[in-house]
Amino acid sequence: MANGLDFERPILELERKIDGLRNFTSKEDIDLSGEIKKLEDRLKKVKLEIFKNLTPWQRVQIARHPKRLYTLDYIDLIMTDFIELHGDRLYGDDKAMIAGFAKIDQKKVAVIGHQKGKDTKENLLRNFGSAHPEGYRKAMRVMELAEKFKLPIIIFIDTPGAYPGIGAEERGQAEAIATNMFKMCTLKTPIIVFVIGEGGSGGALGIGVGDRVYVLEYAYYSVISPEGCAAILWKERAKAPQAAECLKLTAKNLSDLGIIDDVIKEPLGGAHRDPQEMIENIKIVMKRDLAELSEKDTSKLVSERYKKFRKMGVFSSSSNGGSGAR
């Protein structure tokens, strides 16, 4: 119950009742299978009803669920022989950004991703998944190594945004993100991007340029967090649900707008409810794209990646010769 979201209360209450009956049955040797079956059928219907009618704000809450799978979980469950590299060779290491090399069914890859913590202590260590400039420079160091050794790059995005502190700004946060975006457009190796939780602003874009970009069903990808948007537009963070609706940040919105390549289905209720199913869903897409993209000529790969991002957005010209974009 402690990790349940407000709108999940009917589900959690039914699960608690089912667990109670099962415990009672095992202790008292009484057959309550009929009652348990009725509750399980009801639970299934309640789950379907709740999760097929989620609001954008409720999807944001699932994307932030404390039991959701993080980058290191996907690395552990999908890959083998992971070797993590540390440091940007300029300032230091950033534990909010994971970067290194691994294998997927014996195929060597570079893997990069934001990392949040499982508890308060680890979250402080990982800075809640908000990377510093050295994190983005470390990521690019590994990407350039991947290009040199002709290894495809797998990226996992899960951040509320790049760290906005004074130290990060002094060390060139905006420059680090912009440089990464620029260089990722021309890297001569396949890049596959998965938004697995939060895809917040430039913090996500700093490792978000790829040949294929996917968003998990209950994840989100946005220019700003709903709370940040609400604070700017209405001077009231409590209007975050309204902001989430306006931002068009859900996986379906993004797919409809042509911002991403596809939505990856999650288990009913979120990746944390059935990690194995989630792993299988991602691994199928990952292996398919690795096979397809590895066959492409690198010049064609880079050209298509560039055009993919250039065509996003709507541009218009004014009558006085000026131009605008939105």
Image (cartoon, rainbow, N blue to C red):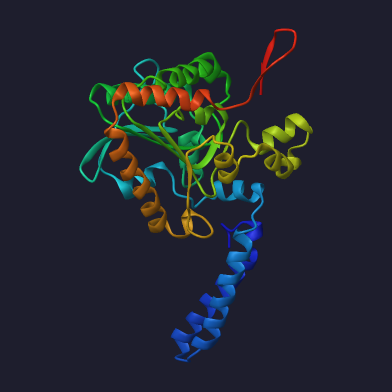
Q: Name the foreground residue: 303 vs 250.
A: 303
Q: Which residue lies furthest to the bottom in this view?
A: 30
Q: In this view, does 287 lie to the left or right of 257?
A: left
Position of the N terminus, as image quadrant, is: bottom right
Q: Which residue lies furthest to the front in this view?
A: 319
Residue at x-position 35% and y-position 49%: 284
Residue 238 screen position, x and y as percent? 75, 42
Residue 314 screen position, x and y as percent? 63, 25
Q: How many marks?
A: 0
Q: Name the foreground residue: 10 vs 280.
A: 280
Quarter holding residue 39: bottom right
Residue at x-position 61% and y-position 69%: 46
Q: Is residue 59 left or right of residue 24?
A: right
Q: Tell me if I can see residue 138 in this picture.
A: no
Q: Which residue lies furthest to the left in this view?
A: 106
Q: Name the foreground residue: 13 vs 185.
A: 185
Position of residue 169 relative to residue 213, above or below, is above
Position of residue 146 relative to residue 90, above or below, is below
Q: Is residue 152 left or right of residue 11?
A: left
Residue 71 screen position, x and y as percent? 41, 42
Q: Tell me if I can see residue 96 in this picture.
A: yes
